[in-house]
Amino acid sequence: MLFANGDRAITGQFNRDVIANLENDFLKDKSLIQSDYIEGVSFTKDTITVFYDPIQVMENENTIEPSLYIMSRLEPILNSYSEVS
């Protein structure tokens, strides 16, 4: 489950195994979640939060919904981890 968490963050909630696997892979290879718009990634036991620049997304992708654009890029990656667990 992904949701916009304020103006500059997208949070996904998954089970702990999914988050642990994703975090381990991310620490090994930061390009796993890479975009010119992503400013940072934070993990807790049950969540991943991706911080992004909404103005850049709106200007460069010609959208008024920058969170939906970022979610569309994250969903395939995150879903691939949740399908494995």
Image (cartoon, helix red, strand yellow):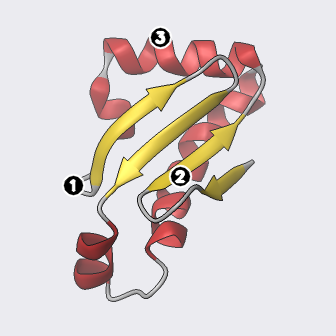
How far apart, in angstroms, are the residues tagged by discs 2 and 3? Answer: 19 Å
In x, y percent, where is residue 14? Answer: 74, 31
Q: CA distance from mark 3 to mark 1?
A: 22 Å
| Image spot of residue 5 (x, y percent) | 57, 55
Residue visible at 59% across and 14% down in the picture: 21
Label 3: which secondary element: helix
* Label 1 packing within 10 angstroms: few (<14), some (14-19), many (20+): few
Mark 3 crowdedness (10 Å alpha carbons): few <14, some 14-19, many ≥20? few
| Residue with the most extreme front position | 6
Which residue is under mark 2? 10
Question: Residue 7, labelled with which disc?
Answer: none
Q: Quadrant of residue 40?
A: top left
Q: Amino acid at mark 1?
A: Asp
Q: Element at badge 1?
A: loop
Residue at which label 3 appears: 24
Using the rendered view, name the quadrant where residue 63 is placed.
bottom left
Residue that numbered label 1 is attached to: 36
| Residue at figure coordinates x 21%, y 55% from the top left | 36
* Badge nearest the viewer, 2 or 3: 2
